[in-house]
Amino acid sequence: MNKTLLSLALVAATSVMGTSVVSADDFPERPISAMVSYGAGGATDFQARIVTMMAGNEDYLGQPMVIINKPGAGGRVGWNWFASEADNDGYTMGAYNIPHFIAQSIEGGVKYSAESFEPIANWGADPAVVVVGADSPYNSIEELIDFAKENPGKVTVSGAGLYVGHHIAALQIQKATGTKLAYIPTKGGGAAAMKAVIAGDVVSGINNLSDAYRAREAGNIKILAVADVARSEEFLPDVPTMMEAGYEVDNASVNFRGLMVPAGTPAEVIDMLAERVQAMFGNARVAKQMAAGGSPMKIMSRAEVQEMWAARQETLTDLLAGLK
């Protein structure tokens, strides 16, 4: 067999196995796509566009990153596609949301689990917050919970989907307060969930701190509490945690965000991406724009993300079993 035929045979064989031949020395040679499982305008989309804006810089990837939105079913549409159809050559990356995709895989009915993906680096940690419209009669989390106790099922609560951080926070709040909330997963992610609160379509909402921060700055909502173990001194120093208000709701719903690739991506490409993407997240211009948008950053290496995924898998397995 001559060299040309041998090369073609190797490419064909590799294609059948689902892995493209990619050399880290030449990677990347073209723009990289970054799939976001939520709609344009929501926190994940908003932040992904900021943290990838420096990708074309030669100090990082030397090629631009293009955001592709595949929203639906609380992220399931995008992550199902990413796990089963996306190329594993490094040119297709995806934004992950934890606890979302791990909780969804525990509940079942999806094509993915933590083993379906390889984390690259983490850019942020965005707590869930309880919000009401600007003209709502409720000015504290205690007032809202008291009403919910007196009116079981009457407090409608919007969120970005089922078994996302918002939903987990709602389940925790119900258990901690002995209330029954009417959780309503909205199509379109966090942006649509926030619009439902602003329009008065729901009594309250559980959303991302970053989305809520911008909405409050615009005068559209009030933020009653943060579902975390400590206040956000950087963005919401005046807003208490649920635990401060006397409700046992911890940080299990905090939304970690970062970039990943499909399982089977060449190890040398993963290693190169892990180094350069983490450095890209630490760029000063990125940090400035994230702060301006009320988006908390938490940069983590690939190894740190792997540890976090494993810990959340264990925590969420126990938590979801206890919340059913």
Image (cartoon, rainbow, N blue to C red):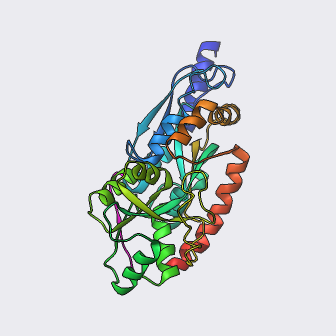
Outermost bottom residue: 150
Image position of 205 (left or right of 308): left
Outermost right residue: 303
Instruction: Please state which of residues 83 and 242 is positioned toward the viewer in this rendering.
Output: 242
Q: Residue at x 38, y 80 (%)?
A: 148
Name above or below for residue 225 compared with residue 31.
Answer: below
What span is in magenta? 180-188
Residue 53: tell me if it is visible: yes
Residue 135's quadrant in the figure? bottom left
Instruction: Please state which of residues 120 and 263 is positioned toward the viewer in this rendering.
Output: 120
Question: Residue 130, how many percent across, how many down?
Answer: 45, 65
Image position of 95 (left or right of 212): right
Q: Residue at x 63, y 32 (%)?
A: 284
Residue 85: tell me if it is visible: no
Question: Residue 318, how many percent across, how many down?
Answer: 61, 74
Instruction: Please state which of residues 269 and 290 is positioned toward the viewer in this rendering.
Output: 290
Question: Residue 25, how many percent across, how many down?
Answer: 69, 21
Residue 198's quadrant in the figure? bottom left
Question: Residue 36, how many percent across, how many down?
Answer: 46, 43
Taking the magenta stretch, the answer to whether it contains residue 182 is yes
Q: Residue at x 54, y 40 (%)?
A: 290
Residue 98's quadrant in the figure? bottom right
